[in-house]
Amino acid sequence: MIAGIVAIVGRPNVGKSTLFNKLTRSTTAIVDDRPGVTRDRIYGTVTTDEDEGHGFVLVDTGGFETDDLYYQPFARNIVWEQTEQAIRDADLVLMVFDAKSGLHPHDRELVQFLKQLGKRVEYVVNKVDGQEQQSLTLEFHELGLGHFHAVSAAHSRGIWELSETVQERLSEGGDLKTMKPKDANAVRIALIGRPNAGKSSILNRICGEERVLVSEVAGTTRDTIDTPLVYNKRNYILLDTAGIRKKKKIFDKLEGLSVLRSLRAMEDADVVVLVIDALEGLSDQDCKLAQLAAAKYKPILIVVNKWDLVPEKETNTARNYEINIRNKLQDMPFVPVLFASCLENQRIHKIMAKVEELVDAYSKRVPTSRINDCMQRAVQEHTPALLRKYNKRVKFYFATQVAINPPTIVVKCNVADEIQESYKRYMIKRFRTELEYGDVPLRVFFRDKADEKEFAAQHQ
């Protein structure tokens, strides 16, 4: 059991994200020299080598910013609101100072804020890269805090001693907040799309809380934020990702790194939810994202967000809109489309219900007898064309499902390489509809009967 929540707080650019990554032994948080990079709350787990099932939750937060020290583009200090929530939820706080920049008035302000809340705090002076820099910590003694930890997150100096101290403080007593370790088998859902399509708003609606930042400023989300969710007694992890623009429009290194992480999240996901802006429609960039997901045989759900903003809707407006989407995604006619509005909370509840359908279909296994019956009917109703090269038709001997996630069928025949692509598409469509594989990608391999043993060995 994971017991205890520990929040890392401090001014911008004191090394909070570096410390987070080092303690969690990950690269989850984006690290950059510029201040104000971290915005959302980022969660990770610190465990011991002896027992991976026990440890504590660590929360990386945005920097403490005020009117005279503000790096964010938002009219309201929503980054601090997220940080303050993390502090209030925490059982212990790690207050981080920067040894190289020295003591700052905002350090004093944040220390007083933590004292007023009565939080348990461990004070950390970061960027003490060697013994010769120990003198940099002297000015922090005037805060009267007693003991503090001199560490270098970048060079792993004093990190594990700090981790042990945190675990000792958490074990001193009190009602700690507990969490189950993340389920390795949880279904991972990646919310992807262009900037400002409403991905973060959808995640917050689904979770029922302000889990991630939402603003009208495009590119608000930078890190990939993973949020556990239980729906119908099944464990899920929602992945809110940074908006993905065309490569030629990305000039900032930080945005490029965020996009790479978004694409990685899509590759690691079990289901991809592509969120598009109803007013902007399905762009070429959205099509490319869908094609990337389809190339990995990922189940895709297209959510048309901001549907409430579409003017003068009529009976066939949604139907025509969907037809336009399908015309652009001709290779993916099976992809479901859902019209929603985060602002009006319209049909948001249907997203998880549809995702559940996709997950079930993705892991569906059909008996071999049903598949063969379907194949025989398909051939009888539409005979394959005569192969002039051999002066004969393709003979289909046998079909069976060899894998799930995605469902994979192997069809044995006499001359697999000569089957027309149009006939392959016909067979795949018949398998999908008659065997009720639903709206998920279906892989169908046509193999010569002689290749049976070799193929079976490759797909064990």
Image: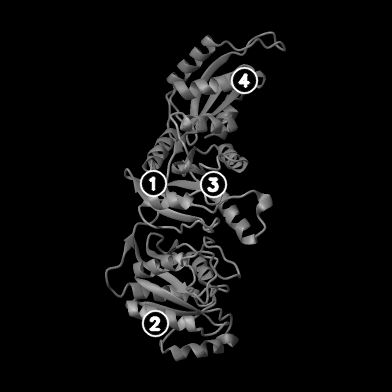
Q: In this rendering, is residue 2 above or below 441?
A: below
Q: Residue furthest front?
A: 312
What amino acid type should be assigned to the residue bearing mark 4?
Ser
Q: Which residue is mark 1?
A: 344
Q: Give the residue pinned by disc 2.
A: 112
Looking at the rendering, which quadrant does residue 327 occupy? top right
Q: Residues within 10 Å of mark 2 (few under 14, many from 20)?
A: few
Q: Are marks 3 and 4 in contact (CB under 8 Å)?
A: no
Amino acid beneath label 2: Gln
Label 3 is placed on what type of residue? Gly
- Name the residue located 61 percent from the left edge and 70 percent from the top edge: 33
Q: Position of residue 64 (x, y in %)?
A: 47, 73
Q: Amino acid at mark 1?
A: Glu
Give the residue at x 52% y 52%: 241
How far apart are the alpha carbons under marks 3 and 4? 32 Å
Judging by the rendered image, the residue that carries numbered circle 3 is 193
Q: Secondary structure at mark 3?
A: loop
Q: Residues within 10 Å of mark 4 (few under 14, many from 20)?
A: few
If you read the primary sequence from the N terminus, does the residue marked by circle 3 or circle 4 appear first?
3
Residue at numbered disc 4: 422
Q: Earlier in the sequence, mark 2 or mark 3?
A: 2
Q: Is residue 202 depicted above or below 68 in this figure?
A: above
Is the residue 347 above or below the residue 114 in the image?
A: above
Between the residue at mark 4 and the residue at mark 1, the CA separation in whole angstroms equals 44 Å
